[in-house]
Image: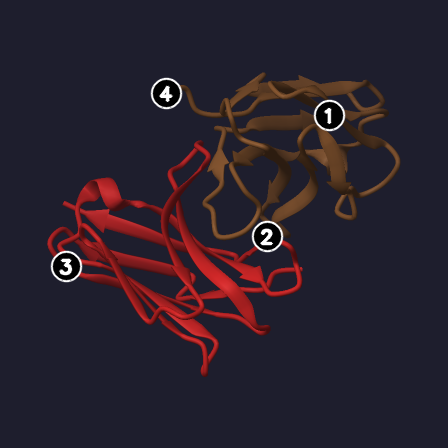
């Protein structure tokens, strides 16, 4: 069974450029989460979706960040324009139900903004 | 903000020894989960323990939960070099509708 698939695995780009991160959740999972991991702040929840609908985006740092889920098998996290402080590892996770269920993580996208 | 705080921050042991790490949290929870993260990889779920459970086992892993002290522990018995990883606790708070709050993690190194 394929796990959560994220692309690209690594992204290096210059400040001001648009960055798009992609995620394919596990088939049949109704919830999709986007996290950011840094040494300073640890693992932070940015936004999560239920049945393709954004439910809570209170963790999105600012308007430069946006996320979409056009269908059950695909989600994107976009940063425009990117800044050096956005450098982090971004994870996507999915699960079957919101509570009392483990989350399944992808291997992340390591983003470096120069 | 981080809910769980792991202790110790880092742990170095030899193969065959047991590794114990602790997690403290602040609010009432539905469940507490432990995850492992190998270098350069995503988090992998290990164990979920519900608020009405006190102990749970999975292979060489043993998790305890003390809701009165708001703390949990993860014990890895007979550790192996492959157990080298960071271990995170995550709390599912009562009013958070399933959103997880992750701690800063314990970095475990197991030397052969």
Residue at the (36%, 68%) spot, across then down: B53
Q: Nearer the viewer, residue A33 or A31?
A: A31
The local crowd at label 1, few if under 14, some if 14 to 19, many if 20 or more residues have their Cα within 10 Å, is some
Q: Nearer the viewer, residue B53 or A113?
A: B53
Residue A60's spot in the image, x, y percent?
78, 42
Report the disc number at residue B17: 3
Distance from the alpha carbon under mark 4 to that under mark 2: 24 Å
Q: Are the residues tagged 1 and 2 within 8 Å (C-beta)? A: no
Q: Which residue is mark 2?
A: B98
Distance from the alpha carbon under mark 1 to that under mark 2: 35 Å
Disc 1 is placed on an element classified as loop
Tell me, what hue is chain A? brown
The mark tally for this picture is: 4
Q: Quadrant of residue A8?
A: top right
Q: Are the residues tagged 4 and 1 within 8 Å (C-beta)? A: no
Disc 3 is placed on an element classified as loop
Image mark 3: chain = B
Q: Nearer the viewer, residue B47 or A50?
A: A50
Q: Which residue is mark 1?
A: A114
Distance from the alpha carbon under mark 1 to that under mark 3: 43 Å
- Quarter occupied by the N terminus of chain A: top left
Chain corresponding to red in the figure: B
Distance from the alpha carbon under mark 4 to that under mark 1: 37 Å
Above or below residue B21? Residue B84 is above
User: Mark 4 vs mark 1: which is more N-terminal?
Assistant: 4
């Amino acid at each position: 069974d394929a796990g959560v698939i994220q692309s690209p695995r690594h992204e290096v780009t210059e400040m001001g450029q648009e960055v798009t991160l992609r995620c394919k959740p596990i088939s049949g999972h109704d919830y999709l989460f986007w996290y950011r991991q840094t040494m300073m702040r640890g693992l932070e929840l940015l936004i999560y979706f239920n049945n393709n609908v954004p439910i809570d985006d209170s963790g999105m740092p600012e308007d430069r960040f946006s996320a979409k889920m056009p269908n059950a098998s695909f989600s994107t996290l976009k940063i425009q324009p990117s800044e050096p402080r956005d450098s982090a590892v971004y994870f996507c996770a999915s699960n079957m139900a919101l509570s009392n269920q483990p989350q399944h993580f992808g291997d992340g996208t390591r983003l470096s903004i120069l | 903000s981080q809910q769980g705080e792991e202790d110790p921050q880092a742990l170095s042991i030899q193969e065959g020894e047991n590794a114990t790490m602790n997690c403290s949290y602040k609010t009432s929870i539905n469940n507490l989960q432990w995850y492992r993260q190998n270098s350069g990889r995503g988090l992998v779920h290990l164990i979920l323990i519900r608020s009405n459970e006190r102990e749970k086992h999975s292979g060489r892993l043993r998790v305890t939960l003390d809701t009165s002290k708001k703390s949990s522990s993860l014990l890895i018995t007979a550790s192996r070099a492959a157990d080298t990883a960071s271990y995170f606790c995550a709390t599912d708070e009562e009013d958070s509708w399933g959103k997880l709050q992750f701690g800063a993690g314990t970095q475990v190194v197991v030397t052969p």
